[in-house]
Amino acid sequence: MSCKKAQGFLEQHDIEAATIVDASKERKGPAEALALAKTVTTIHVARGKKVVTIDMKHPPDDAALVGYLLGPSGNLRAPTIRKGKKLYVGFSEETYREMVQQKEPRTK
C-alpha cells in the first residue's frame, strides 16, 4: 500500500524515478541496506504516522539501523527513495512534500 501511495504522490508532482527496483524480485538484505545507509547524511524513516530522522554523522549502532531499514521479510523496506544525500524509507506524505520542495546543492 505504501508503494502505491508513494507512486501516486510522485506522479501527482510530475517526478520520475531514475531507477525503480521491484523489492519482490531483487532482495536488499541487511548488508545492502547498511551499505546504502552509509552513503547518505540523513535518513527519514516513516512508520505509520511517526517519522524518525537519523543523522548519519551520529548514527545508531548497526543493529538499530537495520531495524529501521528492514521490513518483516528481512528485505529493505519499500518504498525507499534516495535523493542526493538523503534516504527516505517508508511513505509519509509530509516528508515527501518536504523532499520535493528541497533543492539539492549543485556540485562542480
Image (cartoon, rainbow, N blue to C red):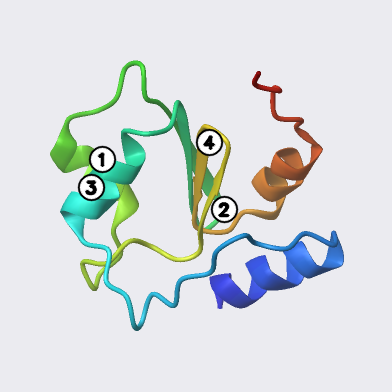
Marked residue nearer the N-terminal end (4 or 1): 1
Q: Work out how far the residue at label 3 is from the one at label 4, CA to CA, in angstroms.
A: 16 Å
User: Circle 4 sits on which residue?
Assistant: 86
Q: Work out how far the residue at label 3 is from the one at label 2, CA to CA, in angstroms.
A: 20 Å
Q: Are marks 3 and 2 in contact (CB under 8 Å)?
A: no
What type is the residue that disc 4 sits on?
Answer: Lys
Residue depicted at x 21% and y 66%: 74
What type is the residue that disc 3 sits on?
Answer: Val
Marked residue nearer the N-terminal end (2 or 1): 2
Q: Nearer the viewer, mark 3 or mark 4?
A: 4
Q: Are marks 4 and 2 in contact (CB under 8 Å)?
A: no
Mark 2 residue crowding within 10 angstroms, few (<14) / some (14–19) / many (20+)? few
Residue 27, percent from left and from top = 27, 71
Residue depicted at x 23% and y 47%: 66
Marked residue nearer the N-terminal end (3 or 4): 3
User: Circle 3 sits on which residue?
Assistant: 66
User: Circle 1 sits on which residue?
Assistant: 65
What type is the residue that disc 2 sits on?
Answer: Lys
Q: Work out how far the residue at label 1 is from the one at label 3, CA to CA, in angstroms.
A: 4 Å
